[in-house]
Amino acid sequence: MRISEIFNLEKDQSQLDFVDIDIEEDLPLFLDPYFLSLRSDSWSVDAHRTIQSFFHYVLDLYRSGRKQEAKALFVNLSEPNETCLGVSTSNPRGRGVGTDEAAEIFNNLASSEVIEQGLLSHLEDMIIFIENVGKDKISDLTTNVIRKHLIEYTQSQCKLHGIELTKSVPTGFFWDASLRKWDNIYSEMLIIEGRKILLVPKSIVTFSYKYTHERYCQHFVLNFLQHEHLRINSSLVKRKTLKDGTEKVWVSKKDIAEKEGTFRKEYLRDFTKQHPQIFKEFRESTRREIESLRHEELEQETFDIESIVDLLIEKLRKIPKGTKYAGDYHRHILGIMEFIFYPDLTRPVIEQEIHDGRKRIDISFDNSASKGFFHQLHSSKGISSQFIFVECKNYTSDVANPELDQLSGRFSPNRGKFGLLVCREIDDMERFLARCADTYHDYRGMIIPIVDNDFIIMLNQIKNKKANPQEDLLSERMRKIILR
């Protein structure tokens, strides 16, 4: 059973921030440290720093001659099965890295001499250059190192959805970046049928790596070698006279690979040492191609956009107005926002305390956007927006200045100065936008209102195959606010 079914969340994968795992069978998804390194949201940045702390400490120990100490750090890279991700076909069992395999990986690392040759700078580079390391093992290595981050994420998601945690449970080993050592503490954990479970943000997982030695070889190394063989007119060059009398000249990648053994990691190490620029191009190209999985990719055969949209709209319309139903409204709006704004907004936290608990924010999201409206807030509009704050008001009457002041009072340069005020309806939208303009021009932050009908319009546009309808709505309302 999936997490959503076990706890009766009444939400499908498209309305949840975490991977809705089946605790009885692993999903073929993996953690990709390279993808994690490219993300700008605060959770991913912190997790990547922890990975870098671990790996750079291993390299530092190795380079200083303390190889046994470096090897000892691999001892805690055990088989993680708390995430239920990986390549198992029955009960989750983490078929990535065992203790013996971790020692073997380190021995392969040492014998390859990639550290001495300066080829290894990041954890994910081991996939390219080290024998017996693939996406499953790198995913397991990553899970162990950032386990504390995953525990904290699980705790916040369980609070968000009202899932009970078990107190005083040993966490399992995680890397403490500040102390540069492995640690194991007692904390609140999600326990299901006697097993520890870790939830993973859906925005950071992948089905298959683009950062692989096969792709590096096929599309970069062999491309380079093709040009070289043609340049020197090697014995692998083939010629054919066409009917129009012109000559076709080519070199087969297959012939090069068979002759030189290019897919061997030993060959890739030697090649990269001689041509580091090609490896740099591979990294940059991969950077441009990786992105978060879409809803339909995560749900695959069960994804029915028309049914999802119709159900979201129907439930929204059925929720009565008023304080009594505020919780129902908040929870449903959260699901709608997850559906519409993913992957730009991630890691929702409900009733986030600030100012030592004196104030609360209904919902806050991490701003994870790499393009579009939310990215442009800070990149071109000069609006601090590390976090996006959301206030939900299930009022029977219009919101007014007190609600604007309440939301703007949550803003700060460090947390962010952008918020969404969500409510059922606003009788005079132009007048309310004028109030938002007063807040903005008084340097108290940017607030954009969204009402039920806005969500319904955006949902229907998505059902009709319009991509990112929120961009038009938010951009138009911001324009009206700024230009007043």
Image (cartoon, rainbow, N blue to C red):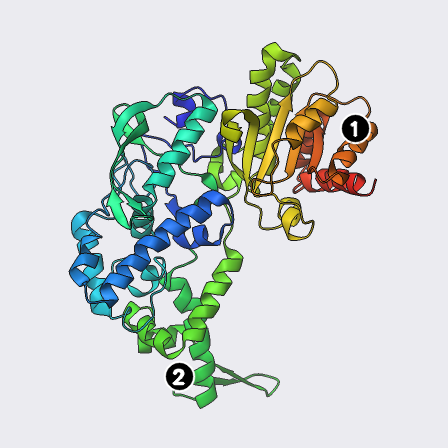
Residue 253, position as x, y percentages in the image: 41, 73
Residue 355, percent from left and from top: 53, 30
Q: Quadrant of the N terminus?
A: top left
Q: Position of residue 404 (x, y in %)?
A: 70, 28
Taking 37 as reference, is 467 above or below it? above
Q: Is residue 363 above or below residue 418?
A: above
Placement of 182 over or under 232, stated as above or below = above
Decide which of tag 2 and tag 1 comes sooner along the chain: 2
The residue that label 1 is drawn on is 432
Q: Which class describes the residues within 10 Å of circle 1: few (<14), some (14-19), or many (20+)? A: many
Residue 302 appears in the picture as rendered: yes
- Position of the C terminus, as image quadrant, is top right
- The answer to which quarter of the image holds residue 63 is bottom left
SS under mark 1: helix
Closer to viewer: mark 2 or mark 1: 1
* Amino acid on which the number 1 mark rests in the picture: Phe
Q: Position of residue 123 (x, y in %)?
A: 34, 57
Give the residue number, with chain letter if any, for mark 2.
Answer: 236
Q: Residue at x 63, y 49 (%)?
A: 378
Give the CA distance from mark 2 to mark 1.
Answer: 72 Å
Residue 207 in view in this figure: no
Where is 204 relative to 333, above or below? below
Tell me the kind of residue under disc 2. Leu
For this rendering, which residue is in front, 143 or 55? 55
Q: Is residue 113 left or right of residue 84?
A: left
Residue at image point 44% right, 29% down: 157
The answer to which image quadrant residue 81 occupies is: top left
